[in-house]
Amino acid sequence: MAQTDRDPRESTLTILKRLWGVLAPYKARVAGVALLISFSSALAAAGPQFVRYAFDVVIPQGSGTLFLWFGLAFAGFYLFRAVVEYGGMYWSFALTQQVVSDVRMQAYDHLLTLPVSRLSNEQSGSLSARVVSDPNALKGMVQAAASRLSGQLVAILVVAGLLVWMNWRLALVNLVVLPILALVTYYYQEPLRTASRSIRKTVARLTATSTEAISNIRVVKAFVGEEQERKRFGEHNQAYVDINLDRRKDVGKMEGLINITSNYGIGALLLIGGWMVTSGSLTLGELTAFIMYQRQLQGPVQSVMFFNDKLQAGMAALERLSDLVDTPPETGGDREEVPVGAVELEEVRFTYPDADEPALKDLSLRIDTGDTAALVGSSGAGKSTAASLIARFWDPQDGRVTIDGQDLRTFDLNALRRCIALVPQAPTLFSGTVAGNIRYADPDADDAAVRRAAELANADGFIRHLPNGYATQIGERGVRLSGGQKQRVAIARAILKDAHVLLLDEATSDLDSESEAVIQDALDGLFARGSRLTSIVIAHRLSTIEDADTIFVLEDGQLVEQGTHEELLTRGGRYAELRALQRRDEETPIRPAARLEGTGRELRES
């Protein structure tokens, strides 16, 4: 990322500003929690005074009444302090959870607004890690920065003041210890951030690798790929272990140097303070209280120093979140009303990111209102790309896509997409019920509308035979349904949407002939909705689009011919060639696997 090449101090300042931006909406709560914890830290400073008073007054006098009052005061003080500490701990934790939860929701909300071009550049598991696990890494930094750090700073100031008040000469020992602690922490700042950044990236790779393997588990098992997946995951897992070990080495060195410096400070106090006690310039109670204060001072100082570790880990997570949140969202126009009209591509040129050649080259075609148009051509001809432009998943670099003569980019994105229904080649269903998946197109639709959509999609029959009918749980991605059943549910979802434009992206290409016939009946139900529906069908099996009003034949991103089925066959052009090739393939029997030439083993040996 760009920030890794910048000066670390500048980067730290930038991230701290962003952290303040995260905390700014909660500044009143942050201030309240900080005051509560600061009060708790100030109360802790009174503890050694009890010890000093006991050694110098209570014990020497030996009065029973004094012992009683001292015990009551001691018990009441620490009970009150425990209540204050509990309140500070609870409200600090509640504030941290709220901040992290809101950051996670903001990141997820923004993720949903990102263009397809951004989402396609990163594995889905890695994106999920940015939204789920990276905000969790902010907990330590947010909690420390929002509340506990202020308490530690107050404790340092109060205790340092008491030390100077008790004996300013002995307090000078801190002037030697504290700068050394600060230098140690500063030295390890950048290595810790670099390691934390690597850890966050490795966690994202682990999540992406495991998610990909699990989502494609049938392919993994079918090709006996368990060992390959185990190796891939193992490499990332070992990298995670190695990076954590390296980071822990730096943390251990920093902690060790801080601890040894602090203990040497205690040793100096014992030597110097002990000599002062023997000379009569310091009482034993004062020395004991001084050492306790020194321990109390070292605790907050070390917490402030160790906050650097939390800061670097949180910064690494905040950098990854910033990279996501700073990505510009999809943009649309301000027109809310999308007219019913012809769909047209005008001199459209489009190139995918990082591609050398354009997928569409000055493509122009027009689909009149209420027509059913088919896009056909060989693989890679640009059919799905054209459909993606119509759905505004991408925008052309040149030319424009219009509805009723109006550029799609002038319409509000949500308004535009509410008018477009999509039935993809591989139907995407969500875990939940059958009815819930159909109702995804219109969450407010009643049961009668859902059933009507299913009937038109030729899906009502098989749904009623499921164990719980429309309430049947279908599993992740509809794993409990067959391909044809999933496709019919997807078509029912499109019917329920009641859109102006329907995109069918090779909806029957992966089905057998019987399932295809059922799906074709379902599509007939979809087409029968009325003349206002403009249908754009990307066809693999040309037999399914013979009744289309217009067939557009694409090759190498260009329109090579168009017309009806009969016109194109009579013309004897590219469409007639594709039709002849497909019919020949359908008539050619498939040889048994045992007789295939060039088996996998032979190919590997050749």
Image (cartoon, rainbow, N blue to C red):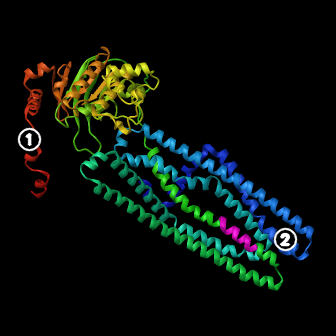
Outermost residue toward the top in this view? 531
Which segment did they paint magenta? 290-300
Q: Residue at x 62, y 67 (%)?
A: 302
Image quadrant containing the C terminus: bottom left
Q: Amino acid at mark 2?
A: Tyr
Residue 342 seen in the figure: no
| Tag 2 secondary structure | helix
Marks 2 and 1 close (CB-CB < 8 Å): no
- Magenta segment's dominant SS is helix
The residue that disc 1 covers is 591
Which residue does the numbered mark 2 point to in the structure image? 53
- Residue under the image location 51 percent in, 41 percent down: 105
Label 1 sits on a secondary structure element that is loop
Dot 1: within a 10 Å radius of its alpha carbon, few (fewer than 14), some, or many (20 or more) residues? few
Distance of label 2 from label 1 (alpha carbons): 99 Å
498 or 45, which lies in front?
498
Residue 430 versus residue 536: which sits nearer the camera? Answer: 430
